[in-house]
């Protein structure tokens, strides 16, 4: 009756995880990707951090799917031989005024069922990381870093092993619901094609709103506004100062500039948050000034001139400046379709759990 059971739009980490979840259930799956490689959008420009799930509001999708996804992700990486390091992270209060914020994060982590969280004095924190400035800290033992592209390659391999396929240079153009259920989907590119499917998943990151608007009958009032949250990263010239990740308390709308040591041992700081009118990946060297001031709160020994422009990413936000950060939006207002909006952090960590949630909402 259908050309394929399911079509997933977007071959980033979340789209691939959705296709993986559906293929594991015996469904035939095709992933439409407008670029010529997997993970070419949001998934190619992130911190590659595995989040423990400390911050997210009780009962939210972010809280549940981050914790479930993180546990599943470590198991998947281990099973598939994808490099990772469960290095741990310190969330630091750099002065007494921030201690109350640590209290709130500690309570939220407990409510979210996050394991491996311990409160440290400043002295205990410095025993672990001698260069850190902290009057108190939280140690999250389950936080880590990983090879996100290796992870996506492993997902691609699983999808293809199950008989699925990824169609590259095949941008989603439109979908029309069929009278008896399912969809007729049109893909563009050099070789345009139309396919019918029983289920449709929209997981195109920054293009989520535009894709939803091209589904006939998708309620316009269920498409949230699109905001682009640019985040810039700077790299450190010189040896990494910490083994663990180091985070100050979150800023409004994001986790804020933090320290990360990647799998190759290089130190990075970022991302900051700058709302932009359109996706823009240029790194402005002048932003380093703000980084020096911010980073020296938790690493006073940062040398002058040690930060070099690294890269920038853009988050698919569904809230603007000064607005409360909303939950993930997994819209099911059209039968047989799940549209994913606002899948920013911790979307990468949560991706396997998001895939499972999408399959559940489709009833498969």
Image (tube, rainbow, N blue to C red):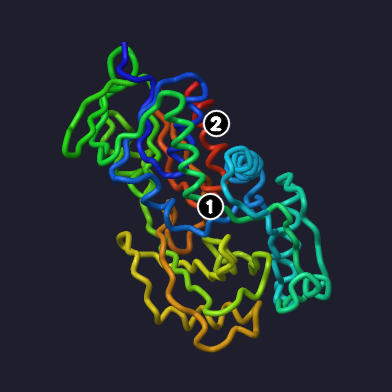
Whichever of labels 1 and 2 marks the residue nearer the N terminus, that label is 1
Q: Residue 344: x percent and y percent?
A: 48, 51
Judged left or right of residue 105, residue 211 is left
For residue 291, above or below residue 331:
below
Badge 1 marks a residue whose secondary structure is loop
Q: Residue 346: x percent and y percent?
A: 55, 50
For residue 220, above or below residue 111:
above
- Name the residue furthest bottom: 304
Judged left or right of residue 53, residue 268 is left
Judged left or right of residue 190, residue 23 is right
Q: Residue at x 20, y 28 (%)?
A: 193
Looking at the rendered image, the quarter that the N terminus falls into is top left
Badge 2 marks a residue whose secondary structure is helix
For residue 53, above or below residue 21:
below
Q: Quadrant of residue 128?
A: bottom right
Q: Residues within 10 Å of mark 2 (few under 14, many from 20)?
A: many
According to the image, label 2 marks what residue? 356
Q: Residue 256: x percent and y percent?
A: 55, 66
Q: Residue at x 48, y 73 (%)?
A: 234
Q: Residue 267: x percent and y percent?
A: 56, 70
In this rendering, which labeled residue sits more in front, label 1 or label 2? 1
Q: Residue at x 40, y 47 (%)?
A: 39
Q: CA distance from mark 1 to mark 2?
A: 22 Å
According to the image, label 1 marks what residue? 147
Q: Residues within 10 Å of mark 1 (few under 14, many from 20)?
A: some
């Amino acid at each position: 009756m259908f050309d394929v059971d399911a079509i997933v739009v977007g071959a980033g980490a979340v789209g691939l995880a959705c296709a993986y979840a559906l293929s594991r259930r015996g469904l035939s799956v095709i992933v439409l990707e407008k670029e010529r490689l997997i993970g070419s959008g949001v998934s190619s420009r992130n911190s590659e951090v595995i989040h423990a799930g400390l911050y997210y509001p009780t009962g939210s999708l972010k809280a549940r799917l981050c914790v479930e996804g993180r546990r599943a992700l470590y198991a998947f990486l281990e099973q598939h031989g994808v490099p990772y390091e469960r290095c741990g992270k310190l969330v630091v209060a750099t002065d007494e005024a921030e201690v109350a914020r640590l209290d709130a994060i500690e309570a939220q982590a407990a409510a979210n069922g996050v394991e491996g969280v311990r409160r440290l004095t400043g002295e205990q924190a410095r025993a672990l990381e001698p260069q850190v400035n902290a009057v108190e800290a939280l140690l999250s033992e389950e936080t880590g870093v990983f090879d996100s592209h290796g992870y996506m390659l492993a997902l691609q391999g699983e999808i293809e092993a199950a008989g699925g396929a990824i169609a590259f240079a095949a941008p989603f153009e439109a979908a029309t619901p069929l009278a008896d259920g399912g969809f007729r989907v049109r893909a563009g590119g050099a070789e345009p094609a139309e396919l019918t499917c029983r289920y449709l998943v929209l997981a195109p990151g920054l293009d989520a709103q535009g894709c939803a608007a091209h589904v006939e009958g998708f309620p316009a009032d269920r498409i949230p506004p699109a905001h682009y949250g640019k985040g810039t990263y700077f790299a450190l010239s010189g040896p990494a100062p910490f083994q663990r990740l180091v985070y100050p308390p979150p800023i409004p709308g994001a986790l804020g500039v933090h320290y990360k040591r990647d799998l190759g041992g290089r130190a990075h700081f970022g991302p900051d948050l700058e709302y932009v009118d359109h996706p823009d990946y240029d790194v402005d060297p002048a932003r380093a000034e703000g980084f020096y001031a911010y980073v020296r709160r938790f690493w006073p020994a940062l040398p002058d001139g040690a930060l070099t422009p690294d890269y920038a990413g853009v988050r698919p936000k569904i809230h603007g400046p000064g607005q409360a950060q909303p939950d993930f939006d997994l819209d099911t207002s059209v039968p047989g379709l799940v549209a994913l909006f606002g899948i920013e952090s911790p979307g990468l960590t949560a991706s396997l759990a998001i895939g499972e949630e999408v399959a559940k909402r489709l009833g498969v």
